[in-house]
Image (cartoon, helix red, strand yellow):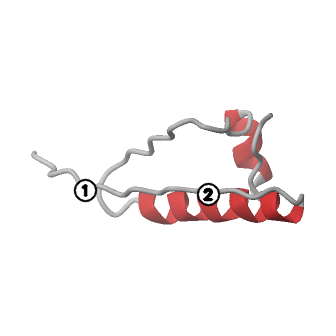
Amino acid sequence: MSLETDYERLNKAVGGFEPNTILTVSALSGAGKSTLSKRIVNSITKNLAEKGFDCIALSFNFEMLAHK
């Protein structure tokens, strides 16, 4: 079962998200990683709820120090 978001281009690019997996998003500071992660989680849980599924989503955000 592949979990889809509300973002068709994202779904096509990654082929959907697999349940019970860990997704890692990385980029430079200020690139929008936290916003993207929250939108993905909210979109997937909304779509599952509309289909009648109960779900729990965990989202952990960690900042790593950047060195030049």
Classify mark 1: helix, strand or loop. loop
Q: Is 57 situated left or right of 32 in this image?
A: right
Amino acid carrying mark 2 in the image: Ile
Q: For this rendering, which residue is in front, 46 or 64?
A: 46
Name the residue at 75% across, 47% down. 9
Query: What residue is disc 2 on?
Result: 56
Name the residue at 52% across, 57% down. 37
In the picture, which quadrant includes the C terminus? top left
Classify mark 2: helix, strand or loop. loop
Furthest-right residue in this view: 51
Q: For this rendering, which residue is in front, 28 or 52?
A: 52
Q: Position of residue 29 (x, y in %)?
A: 29, 58
Query: What residue is disc 1 on?
Result: 63
Name the residue at 15% across, 52% down. 65
Amino acid carrying mark 1 in the image: Glu
In the picture, which quadrant includes the N terminus? top right
